[in-house]
């Protein structure tokens, strides 16, 4: 089966800045795919090329089995990073318009829009002007515009940014539901834990290149099942200098300790007993967060 | 097509639903009426003044004919000119000098002297404080000429009696008619010419400017509110641009239609009331041929100018930033307006013909020419063809600029950069 999205050797340069540098990327149909990477890594530029908003300088973009044409855009739901709505329009009118330019009949678009507004608890606002909505509500309205056409492919650029946990869950539920119904979902995010929960596959972009891509579980396995989560009382500063310990990450509530490839976690446990009061000792795969930091470098992860 | 239509529908409905559209539509004719009223006030309501003229006639035979010739009446029915015969005291010059203080004081409008030998050099002189009053001096000259010609005929040996002389000297009344291609010649009054030309030219100018800028504003707003990217997720830039330009153009046409229907209704009303003939004939300015010309040049002009305004909207981030670029474009509309009197008075001059063939000026200048005379059909045809070519070029360029510019934020590109995009 042909992938839902395939980028081959795609390059895009703005002036002297190479935003995307020979990217190869495949998003298989029916999967949830996470596009990760620090700010300025080329995520949004890649998405804009997939949406045919930018034309690549080199390389090929194929979406839903073809070069993106007018008809294909109708099968894609798109939530851009830059949220934007017609501020002076009534919410229901605006959704009708958004559906209509995706090829729906205006009446059907209005009906679908209103149903989705109910689903996302915005039903009471349908006759209000967009500018009267709060920022979070506007983001929900834009999410509605992206999903209301029952797209085969849903592309979400930073869908969770700025949303409270309740609404993040609401979005997550919709994403899972649409995926179960057969839609392919590509989303970009900075939130590694969300990506870890939702994605089957990920790609990590850095400096316009694909730093890492693949099925999430395999990616993590590739980094070894070599991390230990420890929660303890006492001064753990000696842990850093133990043989076989590669790095220690202090999260406050617990510490994530990455071991060298050949090190035995049992040695770590033995060395700790007696010196610390251990409450938790868990051998885990490295988190996506740590993989991200390891690949991208600490200074950029906080940017 | 469905998508373009949906964009048209949104642009049209969102604008026509707004109160400001209806207020603007109503205010514009009111503005015209006020301007119109001021013109009339200046021309007709200026206080009518009687002009007393001392007439020093050394021949002694011209007074009657002069009085007859200067029989103009003021609005209130009083005669406009009052001739006061003054006997010659000493020489003509002395007599005139003795009367001059009265002219300075304003008791006399002027002193008209006629030498005894009417064939001598400078036999006729007029002394006044204000010799710049062309209307008055022209009237006096005309009356005097008639009187003198009468006197000469009388003095000649043709043996004409008074009655024959009067018949010969009977003034004529020149009616003015405009010849049109349809073959019908119509008597044109001032009101009609004014309405038929300047009012329409004014509407054309205002509409091209206002709706062109409306397109630019719409694009700037979509850029600044970041709607643009959402739209481009569903539409191609070409679809968006086309829909927007047509949608806003239809709003403009709707406004025109409202005016035309109102004017038609007014015309019918005046005809039914058999109101002032001048008003009815004034509304003849809304003849079908003229309206057709207006609509054609409005539509073509609209597409030409909105292509430019759309390109400006695409490369700028704010109206302030756009100002530098809109000024030269609006100047292309303003300049023909400033020269309107020239084009209307000399519609067939080489300058007018050439300028009306320059596409960017065609809508305004060709329309002015059409409204005062019927230019050769080949000229109209050629100008329309040239405009269509220009519109095609502009749209190709604008579509490219649009594609690159609409998602560009930050520094405005320079004009050479913009031109490079247009050609790419």
Image: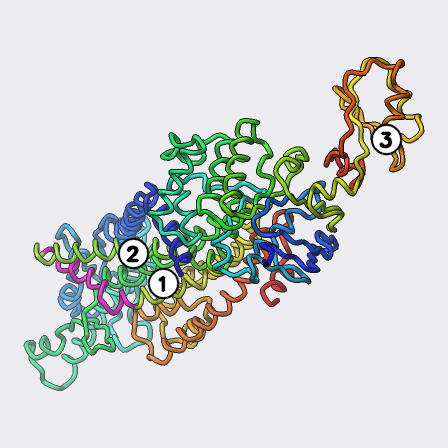
In the image, which residues are magenta? B275-292
Q: Could you say which quadrant of the image residue B27 lies in?
A: top left
Q: Could you say which quadrant of the image residue B268 lies in?
A: bottom left
Mark number displayed over residue B298? 1
Q: Are marks 1 and 2 in contact (CB under 8 Å)?
A: yes
Residue hosting label 3: A247
B272 or B69, which is in the foreground?
B272
- SS at mark 1 in the image: helix
Chain label for disc 2: B
B299 or A192, which is in the foreground?
A192
- Which of discs 3 and 2 lies nearer the camera? The answer is 3
- Which of discs 3 and 1 lies nearer the camera? The answer is 3
Please indicate whether residue A168 sits to the left or right of residue B186 in the image: right
Residue B166, relative to residue A115: is it above or below? below
Mark number displayed over residue B256? 2
Q: How far separated are the C-alphas under marks 1 and 2?
A: 10 Å
Please indicate whether residue A187 sits to the left or right of residue B165 in the image: right
Residue B414, relative to residue B224: is it above or below? below
Q: Residues within 10 Å of mark 3 (few under 14, many from 20)?
A: some
Q: Residue at x 79, y 40 (%)?
A: A223
> Quadrant where the C terminus of chain B lies?
bottom right
Camera sees residue B15: no
The mark tally for this picture is: 3
Q: Residue at x 73, y 44 (%)?
A: A218
Q: How far separated are the C-alphas under marks 3 and 1?
A: 74 Å
| Tag 3 and tag 2 share a subunit | no
Does the segment drawn in magenta span residue B291?
Answer: yes
């Amino acid at each position: 089966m042909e992938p839902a999205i395939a980028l081959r050797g795609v390059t895009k340069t703005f002036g002297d800045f190479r935003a995307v540098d020979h990217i190869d990327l495949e998003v298989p149909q029916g999967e949830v795919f996470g596009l990760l990477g620090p700010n300025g890594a080329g995520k949004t530029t890649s998405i804009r090329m997939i949406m045919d908003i930018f034309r690549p300088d080199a390389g090929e973009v194929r979406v839903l089995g073809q070069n993106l044409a007018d008809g294909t855009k109708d099968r894609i739901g798109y939530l851009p990073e830059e949220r934007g709505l017609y501020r002076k329009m009534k919410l229901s009118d605006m959704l009708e318009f958004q559906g209509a330019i995706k090829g729906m009949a205006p009446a059907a678009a209005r009906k679908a829009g209103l149903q989705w507004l109910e689903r996302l608890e915005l039903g009471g606002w349908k006759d209000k002007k967009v500018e009267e909505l709060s920022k979070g509500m506007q983001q929900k309205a834009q999410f509605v515009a992206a999903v209301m056409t029952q797209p085969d492919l849903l592309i979400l650029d930073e869908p969770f940014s700025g949303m409270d946990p309740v609404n993040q869950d609401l979005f997550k539920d919709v994403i899972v539901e649409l995926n179960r119904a057969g839609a392919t979902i590509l989303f970009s995010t900075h939130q590694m834990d969300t990506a870890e929960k939702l994605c089957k596959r990920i790609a990590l972009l850095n400096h316009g290149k694909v730093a890492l891509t693949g099925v999430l579980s395999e990616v993590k396995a590739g980094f070894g099942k070599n991390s230990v989560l420890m929660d303890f009382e006492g001064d753990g500063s000696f842990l850093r200098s133990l043989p076989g310990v590669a790095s220690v990450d202090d999260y406050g509530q617990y510490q994530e300790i990455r071991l060298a490839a050949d090190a035995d976690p049992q040695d770590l446990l033995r060395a700790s007993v007696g010196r610390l009061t251990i409450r938790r000792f868990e051998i885990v795969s490295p988190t996506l967060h740590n993989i991200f930091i390891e690949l991208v470098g600490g200074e950029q992860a906080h940017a | 097509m469905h998508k373009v239509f949906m964009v048209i529908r949104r642009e049209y409905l969102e604008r026509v639903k707004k109160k400001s559209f209806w207020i603007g539509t109503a205010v514009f004719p009111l503005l015209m009426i006020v301007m119109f009223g001021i013109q009339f006030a200046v021309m007709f309501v200026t206080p009518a003044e009687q002009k007393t003229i001392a007439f020093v006639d050394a021949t002694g035979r011209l007074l009657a004919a002069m009085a007859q010739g200067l029989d103009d009446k003021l609005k209130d029915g009083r005669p406009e000119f009052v001739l006061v015969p003054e006997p010659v005291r000493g020489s003509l010059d002395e007599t005139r000098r003795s009367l001059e203080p009265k002219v300075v004081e304003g008791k006399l409008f002027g002193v008209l002297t006629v030498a005894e030998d009417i064939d001598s050099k400078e036999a006729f002189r007029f002394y006044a404080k204000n010799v710049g009053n062309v209307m008055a001096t022209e009237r006096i000259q005309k009356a005097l000429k008639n009187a003198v010609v009468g006197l000469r005929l009388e003095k000649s040996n043709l043996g004409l009696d008074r009655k024959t002389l009067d018949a010969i000297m009977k003034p004529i009344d020149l009616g003015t008619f405009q010849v049109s291609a349809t073959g019908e010649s119509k008597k044109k009054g001032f009101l009609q010419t004014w309405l038929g030309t300047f009012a329409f030219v004014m509407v054309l100018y205002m509409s091209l400017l206002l709706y062109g800028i409306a397109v630019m504003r719409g694009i700037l707003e979509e850029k600044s509110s970041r709607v643009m990217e959402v739209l481009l997720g569903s539409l191609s830039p070409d679809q968006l641009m086309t829909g927007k330009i047509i949608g806003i153009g239809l709003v403009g046409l709707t406004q025109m239609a409202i005016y035309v229907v109102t004017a038609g209704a007014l015309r019918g009303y005046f005809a039914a009331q058999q109101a002032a003939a001048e008003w009815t004939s004034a509304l003849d300015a809304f003849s079908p041929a003229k309206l057709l010309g207006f609509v054609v040049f409005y539509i073509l002009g609209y597409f030409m100018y909105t292509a430019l305004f759309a390109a400006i909207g695409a490369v700028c981030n704010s109206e302030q930033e756009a100002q530098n670029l809109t000024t030269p474009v609006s100047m292309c509309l303003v300049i023909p307006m400033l020269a309107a009197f020239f084009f209307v008075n000399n519609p067939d001059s080489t300058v007018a013909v050439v300028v009306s063939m320059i596409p960017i000026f065609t809508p305004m200048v060709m329309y002015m020419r059409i409204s005062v005379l019927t230019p050769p059909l080949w000229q109209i045809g050629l100008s329309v063809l040239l405009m269509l070519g220009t519109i095609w070029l502009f749209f190709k360029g604008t579509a490219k600029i649009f594609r690159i510019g609409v998602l560009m934020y930050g520094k405005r590109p320079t004009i050479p950069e913009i031109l490079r995009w247009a050609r790419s």
